[in-house]
Amino acid sequence: MNKVLIAICAAMLVFTGCSTKGGSQGKAGVEQRDLFDEKNKDEAARAARVQQEQEDLKRQMEEQKRKDEAARRAAESEQAVVKPLPESGMSEKSLSDPASMLRDPSNPLSKRSIYYDFDAYNIKEEFQSVVEAHAKFLLEHKTMKMRVEGNCDERGSREYNLALGQRRADSVKRALTLLGVPGKQIETVSFGSEKPKSNGHDDDAWAENRRSDLAYVGIDQ
Amino acid sequence: MNHNGIMSFGRTHALWRLVVCLLCLSAATARAQLTIEIVGGGGDQIPITVLPLSSEDKFQQRISEVVAADLSRSGRFRVQDIGSVRPLPSEPSEVNYRYWKNRGSQSLVIGKVTPRADGKVEVRFRMLDTAKEAQVVGYAYTITVPQLRAIAHKIADIIYEKLTGEPGVFSTRIAYVARFPQRFELHVADADGVNSQFILAHKEPIISPAWSPDGTRIAYVSFEQRRSIVFIHNLIDGTRRVLAAYDGINSAPAWSPDGKRIALALSKDGVTQVYLINPDGTGLARVTNSNSIDTEPSFAPDGKHLLFTSDRGGSPQIYRMGIAGDNVERMTFEGNYNVTPRYSPDGKTFAYIQRGQNRYSLALMDIATHQVQILTDSPLDGSPAFAPNGRLILYASIVGGHGILAAVSSDGRIKQKITASAQDVREPAWGPLVSTIERTTN
């Protein structure tokens, strides 16, 4: 289709380049109609028609793509909730059930921790997608509340670590609010170095403990 | 929560009082005990002999043994054996000074314990200078039997002060946190580790205990409500109240020397800063004004300055300021991590934790000269706490994965090892000097 359009455009350029303007008065006063003009008009009309069809087609294709995408997502969600409930034996749930989305291991929302470099509180690039996924979720589910829990490794001052943990939690909250999440949907708390997840005393344990956890109130208690 | 952050417990508070009181009463069999032993003595130790007091063996608490252990543990004394003179003298007239001089005993402690008909006990002691063949000091006390150990500590204090010129700390108490699986306990013990009892226990962490200057209350940070909240605990009646439960962290309580204000680190206004507050929770005032972490305030003994930790310069360092937040002066310049400042009782130095080559060591800085002395070299030391006479510094350490307590003298020579029956102890705090027992001169 495109090749034909290009050919027509090229042809149009050739004709407009070569043609004289409209009709011209001949020497004998007889009106001479340039047959090429008529042909040009036809070509122009056809080109316009082709362009119109082209645009229609593009619109149709986008529309179809949107429909396909929605269908795919719908299919995925359906797949995720196809677990029979013991009480009712139903095998389907509402597509927007937040608890299921949060627990689905194939959903980026299931990632609940952001890890930090030593002494640092900035969110590393590798965790941007986690923040974005949770921001989107919170925006779509305005009654969900998140609690960000900041933690530090065991080294150094407990009190400074308590403050650093708070700073880590606050910076996650700030990242979420910059993505549009209302502040009242997010609370922050610091455990400093007081509640380590890993009880070792080596680099691996310390890396595991330098962490903000994203917990959903009422779901992750 | 009302607008100044104090929570009223209402019915819950009454229940808490009951629980806490029950905990106090049931602490008779304490699960955590401390044993403190000297592992490095000071230079120029003073030789002293402490003879058993006559009739002291009628009682379970042997006064001379407690006195001798106190003096020995201080690292300032070389306590000598009691020799072979029998019967042991209990009056100056009975003392053979030449015998003791020949044994190199410069100071000799003798005395007598006399039970009275009314059940009370009279205790007399005298310290003699064997070279001068004269009494240096002597007192008599009338006490009850349960006070025997306390009076022994008192006698040790008097001897210590007479011979070193410093106040003794044998009658003081220490606080610390013991961690068990699923449980944290805040303990108060005698300075020698004996009589350790918990005043608070629950399954969430407890940190930063801080004694009031009169020794009647302890402020601390508890996570029992799943976030950091500062409480003040009354040791006399076992009650407690919330001091600060604002949004964010509530932490690092430090009493002013007159007991009228408490410095805190709060993040309620968006960033952790130093504030002052009254012990009843009123009068909150912000002191620091930075966009960085400002925490760990420590009052100077004149009540006019605060040391604190701040990373306003890009890394955690120690700063000093007036209590109005004025005249902020940076104190530490070596390394990129200097934290947990603690003013010495005489205000001339401060202890702190310095990180160097991945080791966290206890250090001491002279405020006038900025000279630094490193006092320890284990990899994970923290939480320094001065004895109220400034001579010893109690601190926390991690050895073999377990939290332990230790003490070092301000000149680095005296070292004490503290063994706990609990596997993990941390967060020591040293209580103030108190004189509670009346005495009469003899």
Image (cartoon, rainbow, N blue to C red):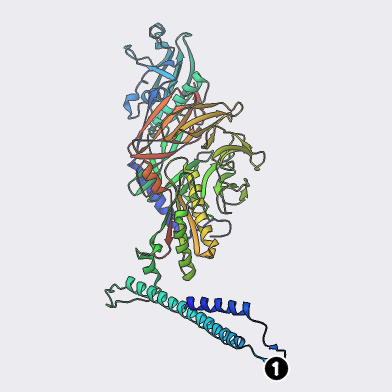
Residue at the spot x=62%, y=86% of the render?
Answer: A37
| Res B47 quadrant in image | top left
Q: Nearer the viewer, residue A139 or B200?
A: A139
Q: For the C terminus of chain A, which image quadrant?
A: bottom left
> Depth check: B82 or A44 in front?
A44
Residue sitting at x 40%, y 46%:
A207
Q: In this view, does A105 lie above or below B241?
A: below
Specify the amino acid type for callout 1: Val
Q: Can residue B3 be seen in this view?
A: yes
Residue B200 in view, yes or no = no
* Residue position for label 1: A30
Give the left or right position of residue B15, taking residue A13 as reference.
left
Neighbour class for label 1 at 10 Å: few (<14), some, many (≥20)? few
Element class at badge 1: loop
Answer with the quarter of the image where residue B11 lies.
bottom left
Q: In this view, does B250 lie to the left or right of A21?
A: left
Query: Considering depth in this image, is B352 or A167 the residue closer to the camera?
Result: A167
| Looking at the image, residue B181 lies above or below residue A60 | above
Where residue A101 sits in the image (x, y, percent)?
Answer: 38, 68
Residue B352, position as x, y percentages in the image: 51, 34
Q: Which residue is drawn at 49% across and 68% down?
A: A139
Chain letter belonging to callout 1:
A
